[in-house]
Image (cartoon, rainbow, N blue to C red):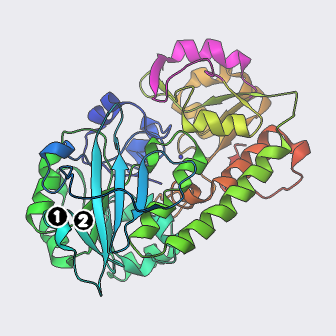
């Protein structure tokens, strides 16, 4: 569930619906926390209208498919002379949309059959990330040195990136209407990694293309469980020619995650869990089939709105949450607050919540940088096993005697 900047206004992000169960107080305090909760960022035009994105019957898909177990949003096919990376339906409610990238090693000639296709020379050596959650993938692949700029540099958590920003070797390209095209062009990146939530900012993407820049769409946030999200490291790794390293990394995380999940697989008591924080009496709730709901279940808990069948967030009134909260044993992921007093200061009605009286509130902001960057949104994307471990400690301390949390802390 990486912090985000977005070219969207907050209103448009809410209209789009779900993206990492963040809250508006969080967004107002740190706009980069569009990550995990509300969808950040860029949209591409429909594939049939985009240059180099039309299907071609001249190209074969009969190559070797690289293993992708959980993720549904991308495929990688090794065709020998090149690798074909396909991103599928990269924004909510999109159907039948494909973006195809053809990866050719720098020391090889570009095959004639790729004329008119989106060819990217690999390994890429310089990258601009338009979401801070991408930093987690780069860090896991030991490719932070390739990062030249990002959107929302002030909200980064990674110490190596913070140091590079301070020394002006990594730059902030801005967001919303303040995207700095001149800076992007001057950096001459091999690759720009973006997000998609709809078709509203096609002009932004087209302008980057017109400048001769390669832009790819990372759809990790759309995956319905944490392992599927983490598996996008294979997608990112492909552009660095690190397919094997990415596969080995993911295999390790997968094993750790499933071992933790197995600890609570047979527990009879499954505590009910409330999430989020309201904004102006509107409480955005993660869908019952969302990534967050799935992780709560994997940790031996029950999401308060588990009967909901949507993967997307929906809004309910604070009054409804007050009523429902009586059934919840725990309250997690409540914005940027650090103490119970801070939480109550946002709305005095929270005193009626049983989780407040029981001090059963845990927030996912243990690892914060001075500027407001949250490691939960960066490293947490590629280390779902650590998030799951924290949740098991909260819901079932009898199953995990460890006292040290990775991303969560109890509000006192």
Q: Determine whether, in the image, residue 160 is placed left or right of residue 113.
A: right
- The residue at 74%/40% (across/down) is 299
Residue 375 forms part of the magenta stretch:
no
Residue at 15% over, 61% down: 208
- SS label for mark 1: loop
| Residue 106 on image: x %, y % | 29, 83
For disc 2, the marked residue is 173
Judge by depth and name the residue closer to the eye, 250 or 163.
Answer: 250
Mark yes or no: residue 200 visible.
Answer: yes
Q: Are marks 2 and 1 in contact (CB under 8 Å)?
A: yes
Callout 2 secondary element: loop
* Side of 324 relative to 37 (left or right): right
**Residue on which the image places disc 1:** 180
Of 69 and 59, the residue lying toward us:
59
Residue 201 is at least partly visible in this image? no
Q: Quadrant of residue 251?
A: bottom right
Q: Which residues are magenta?
A: 304-329
| Among numbered discs 2 and 1, the one appearing first in the sequence | 2
Q: Position of residue 5 (x, y in %)?
A: 34, 52
Residue at image point 81% right, 45% down: 262
């Amino acid at each position: 569930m990486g912090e985000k900047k977005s070219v969207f206004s907050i209103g448009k992000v809410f209209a789009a619906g779900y993206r990492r169960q963040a809250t508006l107080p969080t967004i107002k305090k740190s706009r980069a926390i569009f990550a995990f909760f509300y969808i950040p960022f860029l949209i591409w035009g429909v594939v049939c209208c985009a240059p180099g994105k039309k299907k071609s019957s001249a190209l074969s898909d009969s190559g070797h498919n690289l293993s992708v177990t959980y993720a549904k949003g991308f495929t990688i096919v090794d065709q020998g002379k090149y690798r074909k990376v396909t991103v599928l339906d990269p924004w909510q409610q999109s159907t039948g949309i494909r973006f195809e990238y053809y990866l050719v090693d720098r020391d090889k000639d570009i095959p004639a059959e790729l004329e008119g296709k989106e060819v990217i020379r690999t390994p890429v050596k310089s990258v601009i990330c338009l979401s801070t959650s991408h930093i987690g993938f780069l860090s896991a692949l030991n490719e932070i040195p390739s990062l030249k700029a990002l959107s929302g540099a002030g909200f980064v958590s990674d110490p190596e990136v913070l140091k590079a920003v301070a020394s002006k070797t990594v730059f902030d390209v801005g967001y919303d209407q303040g995207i700095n095209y001149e800076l992007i062009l001057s950096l001459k990146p091999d690759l720009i990694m973006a997000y998609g939530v709809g078709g509203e900012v096609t002009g932004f993407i087209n302008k980057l293309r017109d400048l001769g820049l390669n832009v790819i769409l990372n759809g990790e946030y759309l995956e319905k469980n944490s392992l599927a999200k983490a598996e996008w490291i294979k997608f990112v790794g492909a552009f660095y020619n690190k397919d094997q390293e990415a596969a080995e990394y993911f295999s390790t995380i997968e094993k750790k995650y499933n071992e933790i999940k197995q600890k609570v697989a047979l527990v009879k008591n499954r505590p009910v869990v409330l999430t989020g924080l309201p904004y102006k009496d509107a409480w955005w709730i993660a869908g019952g089939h969302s990534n967050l709901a799935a992780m709560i279940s994997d940790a031996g808990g029950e999401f308060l709105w588990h009967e909901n069948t949507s993967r997307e967030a929906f809004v309910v009134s604070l009054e409804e949450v007050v009523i429902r909260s009586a059934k919840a044993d725990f309250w997690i992921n409540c914005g940027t607050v650090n103490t119970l007093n801070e939480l109550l200061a946002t709305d005095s009605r929270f005193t009626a919540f049983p989780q407040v009286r029981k001090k059963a509130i845990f927030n996912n902001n243990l690892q914060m940088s001075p500027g407001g960057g949250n490691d939960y949104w960066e490293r947490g994307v590629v280390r779902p096993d650590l998030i799951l471990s924290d949740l098991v400690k909260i819901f079932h301390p009898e199953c995990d005697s460890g006292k040290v949390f990775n991303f969560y802390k109890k509000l006192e």
